[in-house]
Amino acid sequence: MNPTELRGKSGEELQKELEGLLRAQFGLRMQLATQQLTNTSQLKKVRRDIARVRTIMKEKAAK
């Protein structure tokens, strides 16, 4: 996920993106707990994407 793409989105779109990422993170954690997840690097990627979205949301709120 590219930060420049995120900066072009509205606050509502960012909120929807964040909700989707949080749901994906939950699903990945459940797969990890049940030992169904083979590619654990997905967790790191989703976690960082969540941080990117939250950072952009904070930047927009500060303006």
Image (spheres, rainbow, N blue to C red):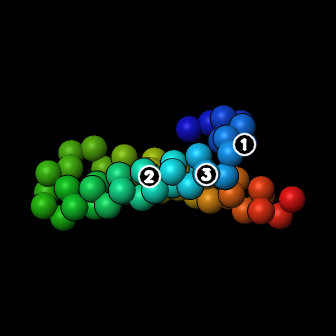
Q: Where does residue 20 sit, x and y in percent of width and height?
A: 42, 51
Q: Earlier in the sequence, mark 3 or mark 1?
A: 1
Residue 8 drawn above or below residue 60: above
Q: Where does residue 62 sit, x and y in percent of width and height?
A: 83, 64
Between the residue at mark 3 and the residue at mark 1, the CA separation in whole angstroms equals 12 Å
**Which quadrant holds residue 54?**
bottom right
Choose mark 3 or mark 1, whichever is in front.
Answer: 3
Give the residue number, with chain letter if any, for mark 1: 7
Instruction: Give amino acid for label 1.
Output: Arg
Residue 17 drawn above or below residue 5: below
Q: Secondary structure at mark 3?
A: helix
Give the residue number, with chain letter if any, for mark 2: 21
Instruction: Give amino acid for label 2.
Output: Leu
**Which quarter of the figure is the N terminus placed in?**
top right
Q: Where does residue 11 sit, x and y in percent of width and height?
A: 67, 52
In the picture, the disc for residue 12 is 3
Instruction: Give amino acid for label 3.
Output: Glu
Instruction: Tell me if I can see residue 36 in this picture.
Output: yes
Instruction: State the residue at coordinates (51%, 51%).
Output: 16
Q: Earlier in the sequence, mark 2 or mark 3?
A: 3
Q: Residue furthest right?
A: 63
